[in-house]
Amino acid sequence: MKIQTQYTYEKSWTDTNEADLLRIIEEEVGDADPKGTLSYIKEAIKNGKTITVGTCRFKMKG
């Protein structure tokens, strides 16, 4: 699964690898579980949704 990210102040989407996804999520949610949040994001975007966590949006590439 290819995931793209976009901060709310950006205009373009960026392909993002899993290590960077975890880093972004950790920055956005602080002490919450980044791996659990990433699992939730992966499940939610399968249906074509865009998920926002803090100031970053996540979507499936396609």
Image (cartoon, rainbow, N blue to C red):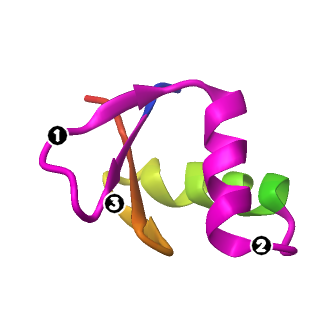
Residue 7: % across, % down = 34, 56
Instruction: Give the residue number, with chain letter if any, for mark 3.
Output: 49
Judge left or right: residue 26 versus residue 55: right
Q: CA distance from mark 3 to mark 2?
A: 23 Å
Marks 3, 2: nearer the viewer = 2
* Region in magenta: 4-33
Task: Give the farthest residue toward the left.
Answer: 11
Q: Earlier in the sequence, mark 2 or mark 1?
A: 1
- Asked if the residue under mark 3 is in contact with the one under mark 1, i.e. CB atoms within 8 Å, the reply is no
Helix, strand or loop for disc 3: loop
Q: Is residue 39 magenta?
A: no
Identify which amino acid the numbered label 3 is placed on.
Answer: Lys
Residue at 86% in and 66% down: 33
Identify which amino acid the numbered label 1 is placed on.
Answer: Ser
Residue closer to the observer: 9 or 34: 9
Residue 27: % across, % down = 67, 61
Instruction: Give the residue number, with chain letter if any, for mark 2.
Output: 30
Judge left or right: residue 49 versus residue 52: left
- Asked if the residue under mark 2 is in contact with the one under mark 3, i.e. CB atoms within 8 Å, the reply is no
